Image (cartoon, rainbow, N blue to C red):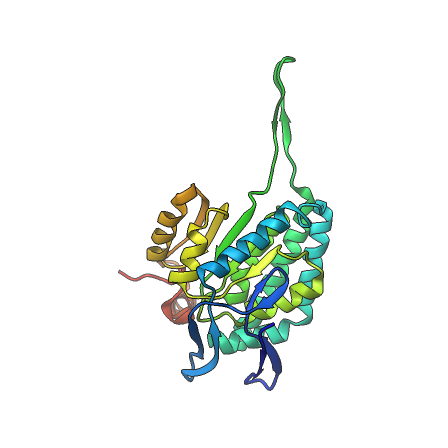
Amino acid sequence: MPPTVQISLPNGQAYAQPTGLFINNEFVDASGDEFTVINPATEQCIIKLHGASSQDIGKAVHSADTAFEGPWADLAAGERGALLYKIAALIDRDRDLLAAIDAYDNDKPFTAAQGDIEEAYQVFRYYAGAADKISGRTIETSNAKLAYVLQEPLGVCGQIIPWNFPFMMLAWKFGPALACGNTVILKPAEQTPLSALYFGNLLLESGLPAGAVNLVPGLGPVAGKAIAGHTGIAKVAFTGSTSTGRAIMKSAATNLKNITLECGGKSPLIVFDDADLEQAAKWAHLGTLITGFLISTVIIFP
């Protein structure tokens, strides 16, 4: 098991930061290139990590596929939901620490990070409740035929998230995938992997079956590319730049993966004649400068 590193956060909290990959309910050493996680405010090194190699991604896929065919598949939908409720409760318990980690790693205000963790908590609760409400339907037809719709999980889902909302994006990707019975391999952004790795501790505590969730921080051109191209992965969900989305779409074509891409957006601000100009200016300021212009919903000016 790789060592943990004791990190002291600016608000006075200290915690043990996992440094390895989280595969098959274990923190394991990575075999990829080393990368540095920095505090954007000070440009000082927080920690050095070894990223996942393509071989590590292969191990994570094997772990996720084994869980999909075994212990995770054996759970009833209500049991999956109960585990998601438990994960939500653990997030609620550690919400201040998770917010402090993201605030430090991402350099966002602590209050903004608190909002992200609240969103993540609510997402897990929502999908916990949805897990046993996914159903098929029969379709009226002639007596000689039977027509029905059956909702089935896809299998192993690869998920790649950006740096601007580290833990909230994790929840958005995990919640629906797990509720529907899929297993997950998630690569957090190499700039902000700390809260995702800490989340591995909560997964262990929740009793989630081994292999249902695998966390593989690493460099995009290595770990991300391996996830997009691996034939054992049935779906890739990506949030990030348009150029990277194009590359993922090309790699995913190897086995015609189901893909979901949330790439760069265009968000105009329209102010009508009868608008409250003071409020319009306030929201224009927020919408332009949020996350340092780097968010898909940032206001675009011509």
- Residue lying furthest left in this view? 302
Query: For residue 220, what is the image quadrant?
Result: bottom left
- Observer-nearest residue: 229 or 129? 229
Query: Residue at 38% across / 66% down in the picture?
Result: 294
Query: For residue 42, what is the image quadrant?
Result: bottom left
Give the percent coordinates (x, y) of residue 269: 36, 59
Give the percent coordinates (x, y) of residue 207: 71, 60
Above/below status of 11 relative to 159: below
Give the percent coordinates (x, y) of residue 74: 71, 45
Residue 139 visible in the picture: yes
Above/below status of 262 relative to 102: above
190 relative position to 89: left or right: left
Query: For residue 257, what is the image quadrant?
Result: top left
- Observer-nearest residue: 33 or 91? 33
- Observer-nearest residue: 51 or 300? 51
169 relative position to 276: left or right: right
Query: Residue at 62% across / 56% down in the picture?
Result: 211
